Amino acid sequence: MSTAAEWRAQMTDLSGKAAIVTGGARGQGEAEARLLAECGAQVMICDVLVDEGTALAAELGERACFRQLDVTDAEAWGNTVAAMRDWAGRLDILVNNAGIINRTLIASTEPEAWRRLLDVNLTGAFLGIRAAAPLMVEGGGGSIINISSNSAFSGHADPAYTASKWGLRGLTRSAANEFSADGIRVNAVCPGLIVTGLNRESPHLRPMIDLTPVGRSGEAEEVAQLVLYLASDASRFVTGEDFLIDGGFVAGAAYRRVGIDTGILRG
């Protein structure tokens, strides 16, 4: 049995480990890349945003590098993993964070927009797992973390986004079973309302916060802390799971609102 000190070390010391974080140039991906690097991992920041990614890697120093990556490109994924082999000699952690959103309903979503979103959000993660797994196996295993959403537990007013995030949950379970014998764990992180520079002025923030039981939005750093746990050896018995981090939104937003409106609960 691990002591408290040993568990803390397992949780916070990623020395000797190497990670790829997609969509890592800004927002949640930036927070995840920062924390993994601060905890000792070598982090390859992958994104289509070259200026932001290059600047972040320079800021993080020798533990980080940037590589331009379109996650929908299978050949680019292969080249990225080869570059990781050359740079770090191993791959222990893959964070499939890259994602886009349409914010359109079925009637107004063009088929090409539907396909593009699923290509980035879902197929991109599939291609990443497929490319990364062999190098992880060479190193004795690793941890794959797919960034899904609490929309994967309900119906969001963006059907393409919702479908992609539900799909990530299924991909996570299938991959967890397929690669468990290789020592690779696969889990999904499902954030709720997380405020970043990309959505800080969005009109849906206040209604979402009002419905969230803890009464606030989340921060990208809070998601990164959960990613750190799943990336670390402290979670070595955890695989094939969904981890909601949404302030209780899925657990009780609707019933809480009914309770408040009927006087059963305090607002």
Image (spheres, grey):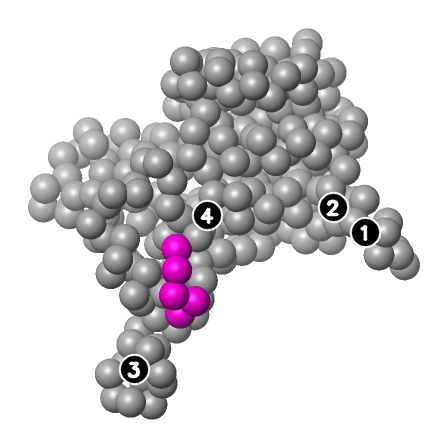
Answer yes or no: is residue 225 visible.
yes
Question: Which residue is disc 3 drawn over?
Answer: 260
Q: CA distance from mark 3 to mark 2?
A: 39 Å
User: As displayed, is residue 181 above or below residue 120?
Assistant: below
> Residue extending furthest left?
107
Q: Earlier in the sequence, mark 3 or mark 2?
A: 2
* Marks 3 and 2 close (CB-CB < 8 Å): no
Question: Which residue is disc 2 drawn over?
Answer: 11
Q: CA distance from mark 3 to mark 1?
A: 41 Å
Kind of residue at disc 2: Met
User: As displayed, is residue 184 above or below residue 264?
Assistant: above
**Residue density around tag 3, few if under 14, some if 14–19, many if 20 or more, within 10 Å:** few
Say whether residue 187 is magenta: no
**Residue density around tag 1, few if under 14, some if 14–19, many if 20 or more, within 10 Å:** some
Q: CA distance from mark 4 to mark 2?
A: 20 Å
Question: Which residue is disc 1 drawn over?
Answer: 7
Image depth: mark 3 or mark 2 in front: 3
Percent x, y of residue 75:
47, 13
What's the residue at 29%, 59% (across, down)? 208
Which secondary structure, mark 3?
A: helix
* Marks 3 and 1 close (CB-CB < 8 Å): no
For the record, the magenta segment spans 213-217
Kind of residue at disc 4: Glu
User: As displayed, is residue 183 above or below residue 207?
Assistant: above
Q: CA distance from mark 3 to mark 4?
A: 26 Å
Question: Which residue is disc 4 drawn over?
Answer: 219
* Marks 2 and 1 close (CB-CB < 8 Å): yes
In terms of depth relative to the viewer, which is nearer, 5 or 122? 5
